[in-house]
Image (cartoon, grey):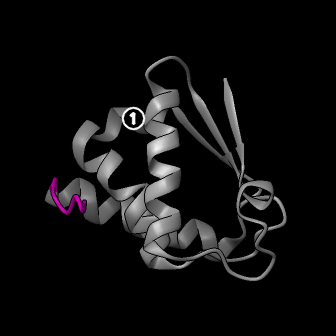
Amino acid sequence: MKIFNLREMFNETVCLGGKHNGRFLRNEIEIALLHESVIINFYGVPLITQSFSDEFLGPIVAHDGKKVLDQLTFKNCSEDIKIILMSTATRFLASGSGVTH
């Protein structure tokens, strides 16, 4: 199981955002998912932006569908982060599109 500690990866203590950061994380997650399940640890990150969530989670869900959520574990999420992640997953599962490059 691969663990991504977002606080360490991005050195952000207030709000993790940005499409660039989201794309970077998505690429790392997609590589890891080829071999193992993934834990995304939000410890020390109190908030993320919708655009960050859309960039890292949205395309994965749009491409692989609901089954990929069985391979992803989200740890230490604030209530705000949970809401944003659920919003992204729901929208991209419904549309099956939205992949950005």
Tell me, yes or no, whether the highlighted magenta stretch contains residue 16.
no
User: Is 14 left or right of 33, judged from the image as shown?
Assistant: right
Q: Residue at x 19, y 63 (%)?
A: 98
Above or below: residue 72 compared with residue 32: below
Work out whether residue 66 can be spotted. yes
User: Is 6 left or right of 35, judged from the image as shown?
Assistant: right
Q: Position of residue 16 (x, y in %)?
A: 64, 74
What residue range appears in magenta? 96-101
Q: Nearer the viewer, residue 80 or 8?
A: 8
Residue situated furthest top in the rendering: 35
Q: Position of residue 20 (x, y in %)?
A: 46, 68
Q: Residue at x 50, y 54 (%)?
A: 24
Of helix, strand and loop, which one carries label 1?
helix
Report the residue marked by disc 1. Answer: 68
Q: Position of residue 21 (x, y in %)?
A: 53, 65
Check the picture and name the quadrant holding the C terminus.
bottom left
Q: Position of residue 10 (x, y in %)?
A: 71, 63
